[in-house]
Amino acid sequence: MPAAVRNGTMPAHEGWQNAPVSISAEDSPKARIVTALLRDGNRVLLCHRSPRRRWYPDVWDLPGGHVEPGELPGAALARELREELGIDIATPSGPPLQEVRADTFDMQIWLIEAWTGSPVNVAPDEHDAIAWFTEDTLGELSLAHDSYLAMFSRLLAEHRA
């Protein structure tokens, strides 16, 4: 993982694929984003962002979304996974696996290894596909952020150990 991601100093668009020129007005508060790295044994679930999406179109990304005002991040993650994938998770109780801080958003990524239901794409307006990937196929994908591949590889290696 790049040092900038670890210490939270990554510039707004560094590492992001298909980043727009401007995300929000200077006075806008930072967006709070929560995402899940769903791991099932030696594979991870990713969502392909529709080419019609305004932000980060046509890349593979983690499922998740925005934290609503007054909502706790863990509750937001559970809500987002229900809305996007039709699954239920226990609200994460520990710290996130990784955090990405940028000028216009802060993103928390949680490792999720247990859920109820089978993930399906219930948000076709956001994602045109969802799929499970093993480590040997991840390098072929256009991922939303450059740090994802190292994070996926590290987690899948831990599972093999």
Image: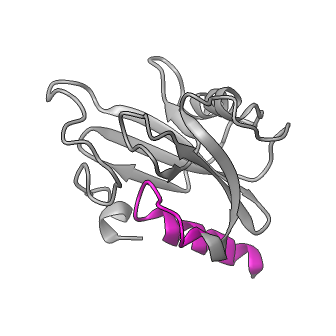
Q: Quadrant of residue 10?
A: bottom left
Question: Outermost residue, top direction?
Answer: 70
Q: How many marks?
A: 0
Return the residue nearer the eye: 32 or 143.
Answer: 143
* Quarter of the figure with the N terminus: bottom left
Question: Outermost residue, front direction?
Answer: 51
Image vertical order of residue 68 relative to residue 141, above or below: above
Question: Outermost residue, bottom direction?
Answer: 161
Q: Residue at x 80, y 65 (%)?
A: 41
Q: Main secondary structure of the magenta part?
A: helix
Return the residue nearer the eye: 39 or 122.
Answer: 122
Tell me if 27 is positioned left or right of 95 in this view: left
Question: Outermost residue, right direction?
Answer: 117
Q: Quadrant of residue 54?
A: top left
Q: Quadrant of residue 22?
A: top left
Q: Residue at x 59, y 73 (%)?
A: 153
Location of residue 8 in the rendering, given as x and y in whole percent from the top left corner: 32, 56
**Magenta span contains residue 156:** yes
Location of residue 154 in the rendering, given as x and y in whole percent from the top left corner: 59, 74
Tell me if 113 is positioned left or right of 49 in this view: right
Location of residue 135 in the rendering, given as x and y in whole percent from the top left corner: 65, 73
**Magenta span contains residue 27:** no
Tell me if 40 is positioned left or right of 38 in this view: right
Q: Residue at x 44, y 17 (%)?
A: 69
* Quarter of the figure with the C terminus: bottom right
**Segment colored magenta:** 138-160
Q: Residue at x 48, y 46 (%)?
A: 108
Tell me if 105 is positioned left or right of 65 in this view: left
